[in-house]
Amino acid sequence: MDIVYIRGLMIETTIGIHDWEKKIRRPVILDIEMASDIARAAATDRIEEALDYNAVTKRLTQEVSANRFELVETLAERCAAILRDEHGVPWVRLSLNKPGAVGEGVDVGVVIERGTKPD
Ligand SMILES: Nc1nc2c(c(=O)[nH]1)N=C([C@H](O)[C@@H](O)CO)CN2
């Protein structure tokens, strides 16, 4: 199985369960692994045959920055659904980090895997 990945994608959004969190914008950081057979893209050297990480980054940034969330779980699921439904990704592993959520220098978040891994 081949993978196209995006690491360290920082997006500003409104996220959290507390009233004060609902009034601010803050960054979340996404690390994403997407199953993608790269054979045709490699053979043709054409972006049309590739899973375009620029297009994926643009779409996720648009979605996350334009919406507000309470839970990291909700944001992660939304992103995974977009990757599968709009970009045809059969399997994705997505890590979502919410910096500073429980104190300085502590990372918290979720890791989800959705879809079926191709052989
Ligand atoms: N499993 C989760 N636990 C918590 C979340 C969350 O999104 N998922 N969020 C919070 C608060 O918003 C926290 O980040 C700030 O106090 C707490 N627990």
Image (tube, rainbow, N blue to C red):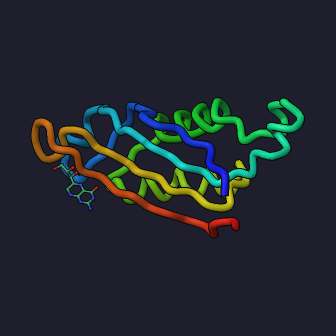
> Quarter of the image holding residue 111?
bottom left
Q: Nearer the viewer, residue 107 or 17?
A: 107
> Quarter of the image holding residue 46?
top right
Quadrant (top left/top right/bottom left/bottom right) for the C terminus: bottom right
Which residue is found at the position 84% from the left and 35% from the top? 48
Q: Nearer the viewer, residue 25 or 100?
A: 100
**Left or right of residue 65: residue 13:** left
Q: Position of residue 62 (x, y in %)?
A: 55, 34
Query: How many numbered discs sit on the rendered protein?
Result: 0
Which residue is found at the position 85% from the left and 44% from the top? 40
Quadrant (top left/top right/bottom left/bottom right) for the N terminus: bottom right
Q: Position of residue 26 (x, y in %)?
A: 30, 33
Say if 64 sits above or below 72 in the image: above
Say if 41 sits above or below 18 in the image: above
Looking at the image, the residue that sits furthest to the left is 103
Q: Position of residue 28 (x, y in %)?
A: 35, 38
Q: Position of residue 19 (x, y in %)?
A: 19, 46
Give the quadrant of ligand 1. Answer: bottom left
Which residue is found at the position 73% from the left and 54% from the top? 88
